[in-house]
Amino acid sequence: MTLLRRVGLALFAPVLAVVVALLISTAVMAALRVDPFQVFAVMLDLGDTPSQQVTAIVVVLNRAIPLFLAGLAVAVAFRMGLFNIGVEGQYRLATIMAAVAGAAVALPGPLHVLLIVVVAMAVGAFWAGIVAVLKVTRGVSEVISSIMLNFVALGLASFLLTGPFRGSPEGASIISTAEIPESGLLGGLNGLFDAIGLANPPRQLYGFLPIAVLVGVALAVLLGRTRFGFDLKATGLSPSAASASGVDARAMVVKAMLLSGAVAGLIGLPDLLGQTGAYTTDFTSGLGFLGIAVALLGRNKPVGIALGALLFAFLDRALVPLQIQQFPASVVTIIQGTIVLAVVVANEIARRLTRRSAERGGAEPSSAPEPGTGAVGPPGDASAEGRPSTRREVQA
Amino acid sequence: MRASARGMALLLAGSMALAACASDEPAGGGGGGGGGGGGEAAEELQIGLAYDTGGRGDRSFNDSAYAGAQAAVDEFGGTVQDLSPNADASNRADLLTQLADEGYNPIIAVGFAYGDVIGEVAGQYPGTTFAIVDSSVAELGQDNLTGLLFAEEEGSFLAGAAAALKSETGTIGFVGGVETPLIAKFEAGYVAGAQAVNPAIQVLTEYISPAGDFSGFNDPARGQILAQGMYDGGADIVYHAAGGSGIGVFQAAAASNGRAIGVDSDQYQTVDDPALQAVIMTSMLKRVDNAVQGFIGNYVDGSVPGGEDVVNDLQTEGVGLATTGGQIDDIQDQVDQYRQQIIDGEIEVPTTP
């Protein structure tokens, strides 16, 4: 009963958000005289042949991996009430540095990839660290400084790409860094499809997938089951209370931002190591901002973020088949947008419901400041999360 | 109190994410030529067009490609399916593979940004004929892939020569959209053309955004600011190669009693505003429509070169100067002389500034 109730509460907000978003989108489509049911049918149709269906799955997964990492990066900071809007700049700068470092050396396979990953995380952490230092030493709002550092990062990346790090020949229409040698790239995972008896399309599944999963699991453990994760959340709920109980709130700001930036540094790597092999003028941009939406949708928990990333990637894939069937592609944009808005509203509703049920349960009234972003911990981590779950057990 | 502050912050973050999701792509790539999808005979021409960011409705580059494909359909029959990418254009390869999977043939990628992915896709679909506008394919080694290139520097040379001939102040300007090698070709030709007429001419050069930031092709406000600075600095004619930002250059010209040179299409005809029409001295034409139509014609004849670049230059009238409005009629003879000298090879036009 307790578990059921907790899972129900955790699922309530995102499911409500998606349902509301679908209802609103349906209404908008009807107003545009587009048949919403046909649109949904096209979205769900992955293709006729097995090869097309597997390609569709690969496309969704490949898109979801960077979105997942972006969501995680945003969520780490969100967990302690920090808004890291600078993920965009952090990953762009990290990706170009990692691309250059990877192209500059020749190492045996796994080491080479490891080096690239470490450089990317270090650069991302460094760029986010600037925000943290400004916040703890000068009290600068992390929202303002991280947004502004985005512009600096983009300008810097552009300067480096066209100046010292230019690896493409003069006159090539796409400017890029030097290519990372084969040993630094991650091959596709399509062998997996053969192994489980599915069709093997030419489109390759990114080799970064297992690393992203590993990062997700590591963060889930770190945030949900360690002292650090508890301190992080406690500081986010109330810095003064955390300080009183011996947590150095300022150090937590720095640690949270460094961790957030390090994860942000990974966002560009699935594309870099799986497809492009170099940072180019047309490297995918905007993932840092989409990460905010994904983190909101996933309520800052790795499993939720994974689902949110898959949902966004699934909607994105539908753009092409919708256009082929002569439907306006803006339908997808409308759905994505309404989901984000609905999530914000639904999170607030869920927060109030949680609080009300807690108060009815007769728990101490000081339970008020639950964050709208991630009140309920991952299911089953009662030990790390003492108070809220006891409260619910009392009620049950 | 605290909760509402947090709610506000969340809303802020949410709306930023929303802004990131939004794309300025016009009402969807639908509404293509014929009825779309199924039912056609196998030999019916099914043309696939994949745009880069901006999509159809840009009154310039993408629209010109569509016009070319539409003209080919008028000539040979068949249908056109055009696709726009998602907001961050990360699905370029998907657009091409989807078109190929759906049986579209030939498939034309509009924009050099496809240069990264089209070689791979062409290799995966050897039975489909591909072309890419503005990107060289010579080194990709795919027999089913043709590059449709333009000698922008030659057309820009004429624009520069015209500007220098018409300039009264001895100072002219160039506003580039994004600092890419492609736009640098425009600049190089323009400067060379101006200096061929008047070696002492001063050419002011600015780019709206740096490489990697494509906002410069769609930012009229900053185009206007840069051009205004040039007019204030003594320039009387400004040439823009900045796509959608060019309208800002025209507005600055109108505000300063200066003149401007358009790009890609005959902007005197497309600008839709008499006040701005008056300042457009000429336009450097880049006939993407002719190139696309010609390529489809070759496909129908079975005479696609394959694995090669087709360069559209002054000789093939792939680039040139527009004369609508009559503002350069008095110097037409001199412009024609330069044109002939370039075609004859007497003038080598540089491609980098």
Image (spheres, rainbow, N blue to C red):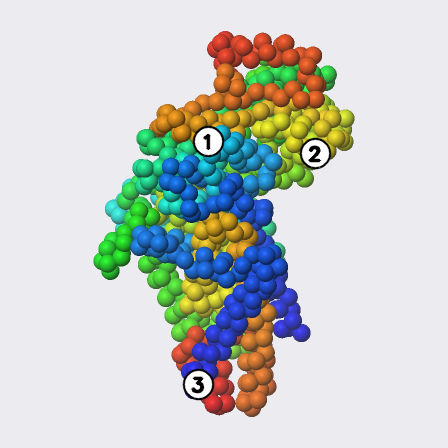
Residue A262 seen = no
Task: Mark 2: give few (<14), some (14-19) or many (20+) Cα within 10 Å.
Answer: few
Separation (CA) of disc 2 from disc 3 = 67 Å
Q: Residue A11: x and y, percent?
A: 47, 74
Q: Nearer the viewer, mark 2 or mark 1?
A: 1
Quick check: B262 left or right of A104?
Answer: right
Instruction: Say if A305 sits above or below B285 in the image.
Output: below
Is the Cβ of the residue at disc 2 closer than 8 Å to that at disc 3? Answer: no
Q: Nearer the viewer, mark 3 or mark 1?
A: 1
Separation (CA) of disc 3 from disc 1 = 69 Å
> Dot 1 corresponds to which residue?
B76
Disc 2 with disc 1 on a shared chain: yes
> Dot 2 corresponds to which residue?
B272
Instruction: Say if A292 sits above or below B28 in the image.
Output: below
Quick check: A272 left or right of B31?
Answer: left
B274, B91: nearer the viewer: B274
Q: Amino acid at mark 2?
A: Asp
* Total numbered badges shown on the rendered structure: 3
Q: Residue A243: x and y, percent?
A: 54, 74
Residue B60 seen = yes
Q: Amino acid at mark 1?
A: Phe
Q: Which mark sits nearer the N-terminus, 2 or 1? A: 1
Disc 3 with disc 1 on a shared chain: no
Q: Which chain does the numbered disc 2 sit on? A: B
Quick check: A371 left or right of A45?
Answer: right
> Dot 3 corresponds to which residue?
A2
Q: Amino acid at mark 3?
A: Thr
Q: Residue B24: x and y, percent?
A: 58, 47
Q: Secondary structure at mark 3?
A: helix
Q: Nearer the viewer, mark 2 or mark 3?
A: 2
Instruction: Say if A191 sits above or below A349 in the image.
Output: above
